[in-house]
Image (tube, rainbow, N blue to C red):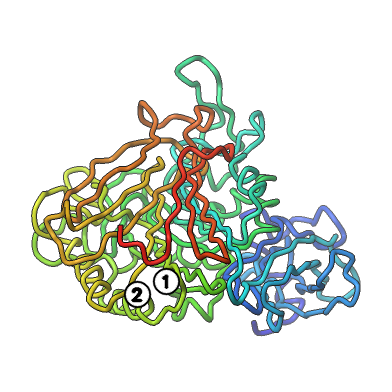
Amino acid sequence: MTDVTRRTLLTAGMATAGLALPGVAFASSRPTLTHGVQTGDVTQHGAVLWTRSDRPARMLVEIARDPSFRHARRLRGPVLTPDTDGTGKLRLDHLPPGCEVHYRVVAEDLDGRVRSAALTGSFRTAPVGRADVRFTWSGDVAGQGWGINPDTGGMTAYRAMLDRDPHFFINSGDTVYADNPLQETVTLPDGRVWRNLVTPAKAKVAETLDEYRGQFAYNLLDDNVRAFAARVPTIAQWDDHEVVNNWYPGEILTLPQYTEKRVDVLAARAFQAFHEWQPIDARRAVDGRVYRSFTYGRHVEVFVVDMRSYKDANTAPRDGRGVVLGERQARWLVDGLTRSRATWKIVAADLPIGLTVPDGADIEGIANGRPGAPGGREHELAGVLRTLSRRGVRDVVWLTADVHYTAAHHYSPDRAAFTDFDPFWEFVSGPLHAGAFGPNTLDPTFGPEAVFVHAPPRANLSPLEGFQHFGEIDVDGATGELTVHLRDGQGTALWSKTLRPSARG
């Protein structure tokens, strides 16, 4: 980040997602780190460290191998400015693989006279070799009117995930609900009252850049989220609700609550806020892309895909050749899976493969809802699956969220209309803190079987009703066996299965 003068920064003021406004006196004489600390995009030798200041300040970091910070290494981070809503990131590098790293962050006044209170956290660098690996995944946070409820302890599924002590977390999309305003109270069918913490940004649909920034700021007001983020690195993905429900490039909205109708304009603002507020490594998300990959020991490589930025219109015909990944990303995916030497190739997808996800009379997802040969976006997935089979790529597992329930799907050519692929598993888990829905209808094109489903009896049940979910993957370092646990929001395993390397079904 280019340094600018102290006078320029102080006169510019900070944006409205919890920072001081121009002309308003600061409550404290020293900077404050407003939304905690978090790490992401962890590698064998480091991770991205994120924080945010309430005013222009310099991010300063200490890192050490033990929590006492003996022999700490001191790092000078960026200036936190209004240009990025006070957020900033520092890539922590040159660390040994497979080790626990403790970090301490302060914001220093640009005069160098005073500093904020320190915030601390920790993470583990990715191992090499045959190490045990545990990670969690889920998505769908603060949707359908269910925000941070102080009466129930807030977003408690994050606390349950932290108790599982994962090495990292895949946030599978719908990380925020920019199109779902919150009300202060919601009366439940049984008469109980759900109470939401509401900020100005969450009181309306997001349209401006500052309003999109406020969506991400909101989730980090929750104690559970901040505690989790301080100790577990996130691999962040986006889907539709970071912008608006079921969006696609080029869409023009007809929704009356939006003044800005051009989705491409909204998506650009949301994309900027997403990258400012998520601990994403810009070097891996080349040209601002969301799709990227990470190796975690001998047994695990994660491929994060973006099924939102390159897709065709939901109104496109269900036959023909549709697009959900785009040619460049599809080629990147199959080539990366082919080159991978990891035992398990994990595809983190923001849309399920075989579940029909409608958008009114149109189709939002991959499955087109019609039996028979692949049509529409199914064509592209058929090409990916065919290529992987012909190249002999095995042990590919797909993870997703999106549909607000949890399920285990097994895909087999023995049951499919399209047969030129190898059997594989897809595991679905969500919501992490949103309304519960489902189950959706399975499209038979790729021969899916719903081996397990845990879904609510009716739509949009609140987080109080026991249908919040996250998934967990445990890989045994000695055997390479992968065990998946589909858990509820309290961490209880609802269903588990162990897969052996090179299993063909």
How many discs appear?
2
Give the image location of residue 244, x and y in percent: 37, 52
Which tag, 2 or 1, sits closer to the chain's start?
1
Residue labelled with disc 2: 333
Q: Which is more toward the observer, 221 or 341? A: 341
Give the image location of residue 348, x and y in percent: 42, 62
- Quarter occupied by the C terminus: bottom left
> What kind of residue is marked 1?
Tyr
- Could you tell me how far apart the alpha carbons at marks 2 and 1 are, in whole angstroms? 9 Å
Would you call the spot at circle 2 few (<14 residues within 10 Å), some (14-19), or many (20 or more)? many
Secondary structure category for the residue under label 1:
loop
Left or right relative to 294: residue 46: right
The vertical placement of 25 against 250, above or below, is: above
Q: Which is more toward the observer, 494 or 350? A: 494
Residue labelled with disc 1: 291
The vertical placement of 293 against 68, above or below, is: below
Residue extending furthest toward the front: 479
The residue positioned 16% from the left and 44% from the top of the image is: 361
Q: Which is more toward the observer, 250 or 77? A: 77
The residue positioned 51% from the left and 55% from the top of the image is: 473
Quarter of the image for residue 223 reads: top right
Residue extending furthest toward the top: 191
Q: Are marks 2 and 1 in contact (CB under 8 Å)?
A: yes
The residue positioned 23% from the left and 56% from the top of the image is: 412
- Quarter occupied by the N terminus: bottom right
> What kind of residue is marked 2?
Leu
Secondary structure category for the residue under label 2:
helix
- Tag in front: 2 or 1: 2
Give the image location of residue 320, x and y in percent: 9, 64
The vertical placement of 229 against 6, above or below, is: above
Q: Which mark is residue 434?
A: none
Give the image location of residue 295, x and y in percent: 52, 74
